């Protein structure tokens, strides 16, 4: 796997991958670089919606000329005492993991920022600034995450809204998944009524309905048990 700075050709390949809506991991595989390298590159140069290969390469070259060697062993820390480089690397890796689980790039970035924020909530403007994407992209990502039960809206000062991810997010997501399975089971059984239970298609839909019933009930039961366990204070 090559090291060193990204070449102009590699940046062109990154731009092409973003245009094709590829995950960072797939783009990294194509240019034989670590996923974290691609993630940092994109976030550093405008984000997925504004990345331009020529501009990114020119900016990187100018920065390399200006950069002075840092004192050995020193790290930049935030006001809260956090290691900024370590935090950014963690955000990038967590975003990549969420993307690999199926979330689009912006939605994964939004969810990551909500989880690592001390307040647990951010405004749309803050998300736009941090992710370097358009307000429309953030709005679309929030709508998706709301439908999945992963974020909720909070009223902020004035007419502004804040978006939050709390401890119940994954419980709500699992319940939403169970609800979706129940709807699929119901739709499959409606098909059985139309096609007939004794037909091959009817039998296929009946098996689908039974499978969805079982999975949905199992998810609901496990989510309820986990929620009760995790919200019960440990005995001393």
Image (spheres, rainbow, N blue to C red):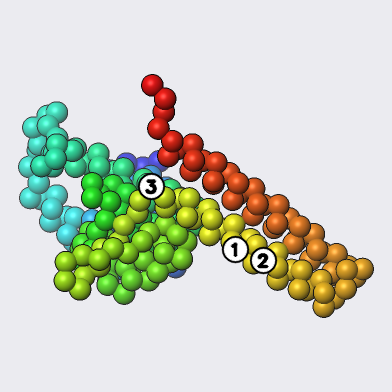
Q: Residue 203 carries which label?
A: none
Q: Do the residues labelled 1 and 2 touch (CB within 8 Å)?
A: yes
Task: Answer above or below: position of 228 versus 23.
Answer: above
The foreground one among 43 and 83 is 83
Q: Which of 100 and 160 is in front in this view?
A: 160
* Disc 3 secondary structure class: loop
Instruction: Look at 30% across and 53% down and name the residue there.
Output: 114
How many residues crowd around disc 1 within 10 Å: few (fewer than 14), some, or many (20 or more)? Answer: some
* Disc assigned to residue 184: 2
Q: Whole-percent x and y of residue 85? A: 21, 41
Q: Describe residue 88's horizontal placement relative to residue 64 as left or right.
A: right
Measured as percent of width and height from the top left, residue 35 is found at 39, 47
Alpha carbon separation for disc pair 1 and 2: 6 Å
Q: Nearer the viewer, mark 3 or mark 2?
A: 3
The residue shown at (42%, 57%) is: 150
**Which label is found at residue 167?**
3
The residue wearing badge 1 is: 180
The quarter of the picture where residue 185 lies is: bottom right
Q: Position of residue 117 (x, y in %)?
A: 25, 49
């Amino acid at each position: 796997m090559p090291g060193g700075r990204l070449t102009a050709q590699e940046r062109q390949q990154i731009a092409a991958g973003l245009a094709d809506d590829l995950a960072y991991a797939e783009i990294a595989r194509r240019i034989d670089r670590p996923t974290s390298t691609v993630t940092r590159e994109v976030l550093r140069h405008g984000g997925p919606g504004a990345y331009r290969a020529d501009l990114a390469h020119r900016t990187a070259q100018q920065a390399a000329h200006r950069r002075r060697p840092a004192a050995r062993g020193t790290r930049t820390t935030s006001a809260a005492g956090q290691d900024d480089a370590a935090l950014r690397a963690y955000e990038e890796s967590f975003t990549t993991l969420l993307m690999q689980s199926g979330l689009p790039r912006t939605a994964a970035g939004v969810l990551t920022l909500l989880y690592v924020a001390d307040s647990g909530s951010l405004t749309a403007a803050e998300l736009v600034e941090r992710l370097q994407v358009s307000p429309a992209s953030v709005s679309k990502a929030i709508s998706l995450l709301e439908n999945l039960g992963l974020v909720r809206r909070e009223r902020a000062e004035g007419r502004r809204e804040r978006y939050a991810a709390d401890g119940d997010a994954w419980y709500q997501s699992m319940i939403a998944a169970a609800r979706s399975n129940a709807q699929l089971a119901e739709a499959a059984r409606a098909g059985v009524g139309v096609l007939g239970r004794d037909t091959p298609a009817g039998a296929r839909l009946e098996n689908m309905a039974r499978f969805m019933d079982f999975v949905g009930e199992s998810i609901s039961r496990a989510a309820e048990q986990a929620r009760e366990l995790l919200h019960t204070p440990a005995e001393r």
